Image (tube, rainbow, N blue to C red):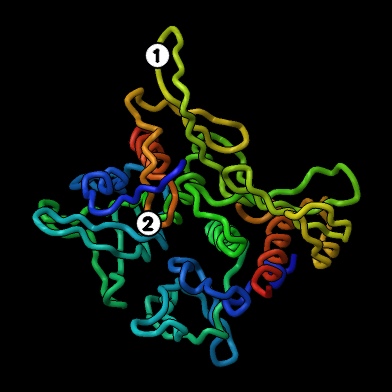
Amino acid sequence: MSERHWLYGDREAAAALWVPLAVMPAIESTLPGFDPVGLWVKIRTPGAEPRAALVTSYSPSHAGVVGRFGVGESLWLDQDPSECPVPHIDLADATTRDRCLRWLAARHGVAPVCGSPAWDVSGWDHHDASRSYREARIGDREYTFALPLDFNDTDDRRLPDGSLYAHALALALVLRREGT
Amino acid sequence: MSDDALRIAFAELPGFGDVATGLPVRIAWAGTHLRGLYLGATPGSHVGPYAVLVDDGYVGIAGWDGLSVNLADAATRDRVARWCAARLGWPAQTSAPTWMRTLDLDDSAGWCLVGADDRAEVFLACGDVRLPNERALPGLAALDRDDARTLPDGTRWVDAAALAVAARHLGAR
């Protein structure tokens, strides 16, 4: 990779890394058993700009968040469902990716280890009798996940922390499929 | 099982306070210990004090010296592993670096921080350092790599204890 391209100002690309924690108004968890406490989330309310908040307590049916810019401010997500803000995790955040990888590994029976499971995205196309796909892998057991063939693994744009946008996007694609 | 072996004070990890938001922390306060969620540096301050949401919902301000994290927590281990990688000058990757035991090939047994792009830093329990990415950490000699005790999440206590030793070492550099 000769030159780094940063993901500045591309709101659509940034939003592709957001995964909803719950579906409203049923308030059904999209990532069963996922614990977002301590993670930054985006709170999306219809008609308003998303705002960042830190999850301080959570259950699939009831989430409490405290805003970063007003320590002590609480927002309880038990409002009118039509106005209910929906928390999204943001895979641009390294901590969120680590938490998601541990959740994904546990979901597939990969034994927990001291360190975070590694996430690797292959540039290879795989074709077999039933499907064509690109591949992502997690952990030492190389549990594989199929990615769409149009997934662009040569996209070398970078997240604010310097890591590859495409690899985080692959994780978002897998999480959306793995969850409900 | 010693909880102290897995506990690291913020003061031992320079800059960790900037990347620790959301982690469970312990706060030394008035001769006792409180537990809470670390919210980050208070606005306008780059060196503390720090805001901590205590378990009962009370938001308090803790000084730098009173805060510590526990590597029994998986998210804390991931965060500390990323901090170690940054301390070594590694670029950020999609996933946190892996912390694992080295192969038992000879007497240079130890632990290894493994990142993407084949980056690795080896921490050896005793002294026979041969490669640029190896370093001797006498503190590791006190740990038994075959110690089978596990943490509540099923992972090995001794691996977390070794990570604590390595992190303290990198923090003191």
Residue that protrudes farthest toward the top in the picture: A129
Up the image or down, B4 lies above or below B123; here it is below
- In the image, B144 versus B31, the foreground residue is B144
Residue shown at 78%/60% (left/top)? B135
Label 2 secondary element = loop
Any part of residue A123 in sight: yes
- Residue indicated by mark 1: A131
Tags 1 and 2 both on a single chain:
yes
Residue shown at 52%/80% (left/top)? B34
Q: Chain of mark 2?
A: A
Up the image or down, B71 lies above or below A133; here it is below
- In the rendered image, residue B159, in percent from the top left (x then y), is placed at 71, 55
Which quadrant would residue A62 be assigned to in this image?
Answer: bottom left
Any part of residue A60 in sight: no
Q: Amino acid at mark 1?
A: Arg
Q: Residues within 10 Å of mark 1 (few under 14, many from 20)?
A: few
User: Tag on residue A160?
Assistant: 2
Q: Residues within 10 Å of mark 2 (few under 14, many from 20)?
A: some
Q: N-terminal of the two: label 1 or label 2?
A: 1
Up the image or down, A110 lies above or below A52; here it is above
Up the image or down, A153 lies above or below B55; here it is above
- In the rendered image, residue A52, in percent from the top left (x then y), is placed at 27, 63
Q: Chain of mark 1?
A: A
- In the image, B128 versus A67, the foreground residue is B128
Camera-side mark, 1 or 2: 2
- In the image, A63 versus A44, the foreground residue is A44
Q: Amino acid at mark 2?
A: Pro
Label 1 secondary element = loop
- In the image, B88 versus A29, the foreground residue is B88
Left or right, B86 with respect to A17, comes to right
